[in-house]
Image: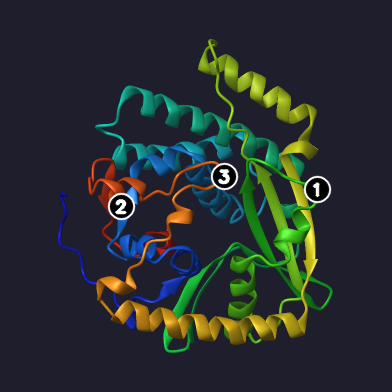
């Protein structure tokens, strides 16, 4: 396995994100690979890539004090996808490059329509923050991340959380009511601003995941644009989940126990602690990103990132 030397992970200094913690709760071996900074290149041109890049783009677009134009949305998407392509796809197969181009078209058309659908966000939404970074100590470990936004309604503050999905079910609100990531964000908001979140406003965006078929990419973009315009409610949904003080306090107590166990795991390097959850090797749609590392030991298609949490770096 081609492996470079990277600094050993230290929970008390490097901290932890909700993503790493969620991976650790699913599979210890998965978390161990992540702590060694392994990443799957292909993940960025699949569903994960659409979500990550949509978040990056919205973070930049919401910084504007007016509604972005289609050209401005295109410029942001092209800058994000262009930087990734230059860094990671120089030696990629032609099929992967084409797949990434299709992802870019999906992202551009969806976000242009998103701005038209929710243009009131720029004119009427009472933003406290359009992005809020946090680093709070829980059980001796810095818990860190970025909240997509915080909005004010009357005297109450709400977390604004964007989710990208290939499917948006009518009963999705029941799943969102116990969303781990948002629970972390509510806890963090109170810790850094002394303000308990009244709830979470979920901003859900559908990832079309469409392909051009035998047509041209230009024709595909037009067809996608037309489809989104004809049924925006299929692509964009918002759900409100009201917070509950007792539930938030129970979550905080539970999280403290989880983080204490995580810290002890991160300090214990024995093989017995890096157990593999074979039931998590495949989800409903995709295999685990680290499946090849686990089964063959091959690092082909992987790279080790320079930073432990590059997603937390300022743009």
Q: Earlier in the sequence, mark 3 or mark 2?
A: 3
Quarter of the image for residue 155 reads: bottom right
* Label 1: how many Cα within 10 Å (few below 14, some 14–19, many 20+): few
Looking at the rendered structure, which numbered label has been put on residue 294? Answer: 2
Residue 51 coordinates in the image, percent (x, y): 54, 47
Q: Is residue 291 visible?
A: yes
Quarter of the image for residue 313 reads: bottom left
Q: Which residue is mark 1?
A: 170
Quarter of the image for residue 202 reads: bottom right
Residue 285 coordinates in the image, percent (x, y): 54, 41
State whether residue 99 is above or below residue 151: above
Q: Give the structural element (helix, strand or loop) at label 3.
A: loop
Between tags 1 and 3, which lies in front? 3
**Residue at 67%, 26% in the rendered image:** 225
Q: Is residue 67 visible?
A: no
* Label 2: how many Cα within 10 Å (few below 14, some 14–19, many 20+): some
Looking at the rendered structure, which numbered label has been put on residue 161? Answer: none
Whole-Å distance between the Cαs marked 2 and 1? 37 Å
In the foreground, 36 or 75: 36
Q: Which residue is mark 3?
A: 284
């Amino acid at each position: 396995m081609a492996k470079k030397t990277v600094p050993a992970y230290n929970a008390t200094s490097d901290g932890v994100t909700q993503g790493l913690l969620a991976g650790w709760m699913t599979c210890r071996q998965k978390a161990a690979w992540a702590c060694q900074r392994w990443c799957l290149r292909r993940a960025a041109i699949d569903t994960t890539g659409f979500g990550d890049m949509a978040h990056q783009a919205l973070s930049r677009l919401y910084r504007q004090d007016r509604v972005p134009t289609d050209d401005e949305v295109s410029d942001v998407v092209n800058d994000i996808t262009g930087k990734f392509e230059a860094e990671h796809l120089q030696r990629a197969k032609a099929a992967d490059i084409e797949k990434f181009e299709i992802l870019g078209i999906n992202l551009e058309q969806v976000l242009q329509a998103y701005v038209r659908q929710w243009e009131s966000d720029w004119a009427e939404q009472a933003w406290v923050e359009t992005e809020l970074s946090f680093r709070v100590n829980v059980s001796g470990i810095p818990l860190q991340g970025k909240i997509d936004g915080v909005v004010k309604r009357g005297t109450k503050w709400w977390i604004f959380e964007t989710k990208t999905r290939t499917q948006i079910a009518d009963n999705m609100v029941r799943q969102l009511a116990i969303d781990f990531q948002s629970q972390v964000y509510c806890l963090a908001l109170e810790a850094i601003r002394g303000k308990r979140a009244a709830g979470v406003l979920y901003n859900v965006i559908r990832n079309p995941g469409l392909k051009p078929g035998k047509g041209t990419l230009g024709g595909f973009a037009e067809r996608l644009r037309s489809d989104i315009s004809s049924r925006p409610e299929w692509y964009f949904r918002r759900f409100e989940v009201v917070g509950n003080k007792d539930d938030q306090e129970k979550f905080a107590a539970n999280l403290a126990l989880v983080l204490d166990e995580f810290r002890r795991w991160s300090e214990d390097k024995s093989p017995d602690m890096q157990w593999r959850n074979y039931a998590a090797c495949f989800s409903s749609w995709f295999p685990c990103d680290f499946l090849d590392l686990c089964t063959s030991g091959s690092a082909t298609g992987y790279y080790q990132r320079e930073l432990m949490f590059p997603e937390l770096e300022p743009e």
